[in-house]
Structure formats: C-alpha cells, structure tokens
Image (cartoon, helix red, strand yellow):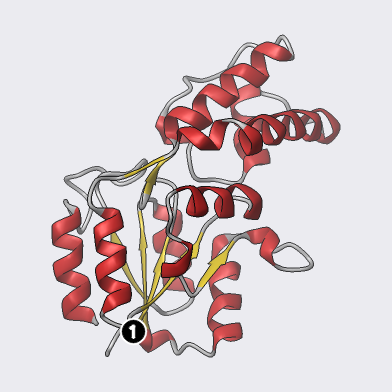
Amino acid sequence: MSARHILFDLDGTLIDSAPSILSGFARILDQHGISPRCELSQALIGPPLIETLSQISGIDDPEILQRLAHDFKSYYDEVGYRETVEFPGCADLLEELAGKGAHIYVVTNKRTIPTEKIINLLGWRRLFKGLYSPDSFNPEITQKANVIKRVLESRGISSKDAIYIGDRNEDLEASTANGIQFTSVGWGYGFSSSSATIKSVSDLKNLLYRAS
C-alpha cells in the first residue's frame, strides 16, 4: 500500500459541524453582551478556538477570551456537539477503508473532548487508529503542521506512506510542511468546489483506493 496511512481533518471534511458551532458562538456572544464583528459563517470553522473568538468579538484581551472560550466549551461539550452530522457518504467511506486494511486517523484543530464525543456519537471510534488534537499532547501543540509531525513520529509513519485529507488551506500548508501528499475536498468550509481536488465523496473513495 503506497499510502496506507490516511489522515483526515474533521470539521468540514468528515463532519458538518458548522450549525452547532455557529449557534454556540452566537449564544456565547449574546450571553456576554457582545455584538459580532463579522458574519457568523462557516468560513470561521477550522482555526483554533481562541483565534476565532478574537476574530468574531474584536477582543484581544487574553482574560476575556479565556472566559468566552470556557463558556463556549461548556455549552458545546455538553449540548452543541450533539447536533453534528456526517457529510453524506463519509461513514461508508471510512468503513470501506478500514475494511481494506488502511490505517486511518483524525488530525484536527478541534479539542480532544468534543472530538472523542463526536466520533463516539457517530459510532466511528472502532474505525480509527488514533484521534489527534493539539491538546492530545503535553504540552499542548500549536499549529496543525506540528500536530501532524508528532503523529508521524509517534506512529513511526513515513511521509511517503501518508496522505492528509482536508478542506482548508491550512491543511495544505501543514501537509506540505511535513512532506506528505495532500488532497482537498470541496464540500467543506475552505476550498470551493471549483478549487478543490475532490468534488465528491465517491471521487475521494476512488482516489484513496488508488492511493492505498
């Protein structure tokens, strides 16, 4: 298998989490009496939480941002995550890949707690060899490129034997930094359907079957 290790981004790649995350942002801003400084759109999904909260609130005070983040996490980790759904066809794709012997992983900016809850909610845990977030490591890792690097190192995966699937330019940059193949999908929150490498889940399956 020339790309036996398949690393997936989560939000915008395997799951549609935008409605639950955006409603959580709106709830927390309203709770704190803050008017959003930008449209609460799916383009916000993907970067680390503090970075996004600063963008939508216009606030750069670390203490205030930490309070906003705490309240968002409390809501999302107990209630909001339950609204998450898979992108159609992704469950079947994961089942088939695992059945073919591919080693599949999640590598995401999402925190460990909601990542694990969502994967369990969807019944996918048995399919993945590992779930990796910035806070999966101690100390916590910044930047997705560094998370991928640690995954490759800890799992003993050669860069030539791995592929990363994502929906944002950050995913491309993180893959390039680690010398691994990258494939962009067009149904998420970053790349448009015209600029992405892959337009549909069936096309992704065909590509991965060739790669694996």
Q: Residue furthest right?
A: 63
**Which residue type carries mark 1?**
Arg
Residue positioned 74% across, 14% down in the render: 32
Evaluate whether residue 142 shows in this view.
Answer: no
Left-right relation of 167 to 136: left
Q: Which residue is mark 1?
A: 4
Q: Position of residue 204 (x, y in %)?
A: 20, 62
Q: Position of residue 13 (x, y in %)?
A: 35, 52
Number of disc labels: 1
The quarter in which the C terminus is drawn is bottom left
Left-right relation of 73 to 67: left
Residue positioned 27% across, 90% down in the render: 1
Residue positioned 43% across, 33% down in the render: 18
Q: Position of residue 60 (x, y in %)?
A: 75, 31
The relative height of residue 120 versus residue 47 in the rendered view (above or below) is below
Q: Position of residue 62 (x, y in %)?
A: 82, 36
